[in-house]
Image: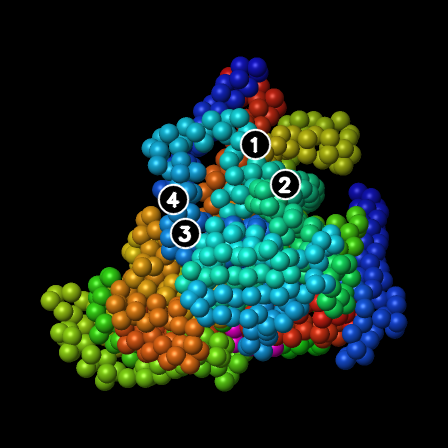
Amino acid sequence: MVRLVARRTAWSVLVLFAASTLCFVIVRVTTDPLTVTRASLNRGDVDPEAAARLLADERDRLGLHRPLAAQYGHWLAGVAHGDWGESLESHRPVAADVRSRLWNTVQLIAFGIVLAVAVAILVGVVSGARQYSAADHALSGLSFVALSMPSFWFALMAIEVLIYFPRHALHLDHPLLYSVGLHSPSGGLLDYARHLALPVMTLSLPLVAAWSRYIRASMIDALSAPYVQAATAKGLSRRQVLLGHVLRNALIPFTTVSAVGIGQLFGGVIVTEAIFSWPGMGQLLLQALSDGDTNMLLAWLMVAATFALGLNLLADILNGVLDPRARS
Amino acid sequence: MNTSWRNWSTRAGRAVAAVIVSLLAASCTVGSGNDAERVAPADQPKEGGTLVLGALQEPACADWYAACGISSVWGRDMLSSQTLPRAFDFVDNVYRPSILLAGEPTVSPGPPQVVTYRLNPSAVWSDGTRITSADFKYTAEQAKLAGSSTAAAAVDTVDASDPGVAKVTFKDPTPAWRDNFARLLPNHLLAGKDRGAVLRDGYTFSGGPWALDHWTRGVEIKLVPNARYWGPKPHLDSVVFKVITDSSAYLAAYKTGQLDMAYFAGPQRDILDLKGLTGTHFESSIGFSFEVVMFNTAKPPLDSKAVRQALAFGADRDAIVLQQSGSIDPAIKPAQALMSPGNREWYTQPYRRYERDLGRVKQLMTDDGWAKGTDGVWAKAGTRATVELNTGTGNARREQAEEILRSQWKEAGFDVSIVNANPATLLTGKWFTDGTFQAAIVSLAPPATDPNLCGNFCSKNIPTETKPGNNVSRIASKPLDDLWEAVAKELDDTKRHELVNQAQQTLADEMPALPLNPVLDIIVFNEAKVGGVKTNPAGAFYNLSEWYCRSHC
């Protein structure tokens, strides 16, 4: 097991290094680091001499006169020491901005995963245990609808149905749920929950749809296994069989699948955060893209790569723990 | 199994009901308890309360003399205009001395030109320190270092020997001198310090009616009244600007009552939905920004003036503008100058001659040596008249204008393709810097009311790899250069009007850009809740201190 962990970790570090090279080259080829400075100087009444001087100063400050490989080496050394440079737009340390935004995104993802796992297991168990029943058909149909529904559309419909409609129909002073940001000026735990509800629902919906289908299939496989027949023959109740034997075994492959799925969530939060003005990593990416802030873009890509690789590593390790055959 | 399922579903049903009841309670009780006391007559400002306003953008920093903050319009409207004193107010299209000054400054035309500002002796910063000529001197130095404007660059010296009098001497005649000192900084707090580090994340000092309470990036900016402001105090206890960068989310936030007011520069998709909302005040006015098709005059076939003029005659600008903004303002017309009609003092109409006329297109193209091929597209020496039209991705309004133009120009015999890019790539990146684009729909947003367009159309401002510049059309015309240089230095108002008129006529003839629609500033607010709002092309929140809450705050 130790060898498996060491091997997978070393491989992940190598992939991360390759990803850093690729990200640096792609970002620097597609985006001019002087974009932000040019934007601020491209105003109608700017003094041309001062503008040329400021642009030259910025080029020197960023070390853009050096070869690309040297710039990459400098950036990588900084990253290795926890220095991500400063945002070309705000001139604040990139690491500080990433930290504060990452925490907001982690809250969203964590609640989204908890909700998705709970609902997916419930739906998967009901569907799997009652295969081809009306409930199974209904839940399967809903899963396919959820899978095929774009997140942004669902989010906008949810705002219309769960915020706009009740507020106007019931003449409420304030909306039941919120679609903007983390909290209201008044604050409080209930207020936080009311802000969190819709983004979490939007983020978890496709996960629920995909994972419930997976659990359903695993449940159906497990139900036909000999150990289930043996447990039933021993006189265990259906509930004991389902929860104690079938679900337990069905969840083993789901653990690794969900770990990989969570790793992909980082991309999914971009749309959710944009629609709900959630000040997280997704918003940071969109802002960096529109500003041409290369330092921030690089940091975002590296965090996303680390997140995905970390979750893949976890999936590999969990697979090894749960299935001894995978260790070899 | 069935019994346990029933028990479980009953418990779940009760839990859901409890959640709904608590949400309804929270939605009803907050703010409604004392409505009867708080409702004020429509015309009588009420003191107190908090309004939540929407902000589609936030500044990258609060250092208004650094690259990160200097060009942020939202930063100006939400923060600097509210917290920093300025020499002049722009109200009803006229510059008036602000409450900071003891009267109209005296101007000695010179040479050298000298402007003397006499300061209001009761003007103080929020720490009680008097606002003095030293603040003028410090601000002028910072503005000059930042290259903030040609008017700032023209300042030679600021005599601060008398704290109550700032005597500003200019190197060159500067008719736009009123644009200086729009964001005065406190010398006693900033001199000798790293200005960027002090101001970057906001500042607690204030010399305006409001002070910054907090700024949580990506979330909100909260302002509270400046207790030491020497002018009329704000009516509200606080104002919160919620940062919502997605326009659909912004609309939804207003629609669902999470914002008390929303402001848009230009019509957005679905904005008309807001017009029908009960209690919503919906108002639009023409701002200083306007949209243009910018032609790259260095790129064939647009290096030919005749081709550019033919494209102007091939476009039905009335149809485009009506399609874009007619639902908001049916009376809106295309801008007929490279200036917004909102800039009433200087607006003229030299582009009026460019009505859609396919006969003129034919005449111009034929005279320039073009002939129509079998495919109906103009061609000259084996080269077809192809035009690639660009704009920044994600701007539905401009994308719609592109489609209309493509159809109109195709009918006029041009082969038009549309290629859009990330705004950072197009507007400030390689396309404009290297001059690789052909034609692009962009917005021109003058930073001030001054009519001088040298920044956009003088040959010295053509951008290069090492020198930024805003003349992206790359028009290089000696007569234009001379006219704009004269406009920049002419102090006599009548003569300056004549020069501006000539320069605009020359632009219409050279056709480096085709003006489309003036950008509508749209303001919507809940009129049962918000009072005191007035529109002004100089900024949506210019009289924020006069706003008040009518109820439910």
Q: Position of residue A323 (x, y in %)?
A: 58, 23
Kindly identify the residue that appears in the image at 58 percent across and 65 percent down. Answer: B117
Q: Are marks 3 and 1 in contact (CB under 8 Å)?
A: no
Residue tagged 1: A311
Q: Is B205 rendered above or below residue A69?
A: below
User: Upstream in the sequence, badge 4 or badge 3?
Assistant: 3
Relative depth, front residue between A83 and B466: B466
Q: Are tags 4 and 1 found on a single chain?
A: yes
Q: Amino acid at mark 1?
A: Leu
Q: Position of residue B535 (x, y in %)?
A: 61, 74
User: Upstream in the sequence, badge 4 or badge 1?
Assistant: 4
Q: Are marks 1 and 2 in contact (CB under 8 Å)?
A: no
Residue tagged 4: A56
Q: Is residue B268 left or right of residue A55?
A: right
Q: Position of residue A125 (x, y in %)?
A: 68, 41
Q: Are marks 2 and 3 in contact (CB under 8 Å)?
A: no
| Label 4: which secondary element | helix
Relative depth, front residue between A29 and B347: B347
Residue tagged 2: A100
Q: Amino acid at mark 4?
A: Ala
Q: Is B360 rendered above or below residue A292?
A: below
Kindly identify the residue that appears in the image at 21 percent across and 69 percent down. Answer: B304
Magenta: main secondary structure: strand
Dot 4 crowding, Cα within 10 Å, few <14, some 14–19, many 20+: some
The magenta segment is: B283-287
**Nearer the viewer's eye, disc 3 or disc 1?**
3
Q: Amino acid at mark 3?
A: Ala
The alpha-carbon separation of the residues under discs 4 and 1 comes to: 43 Å
| Label 2: which secondary element | helix
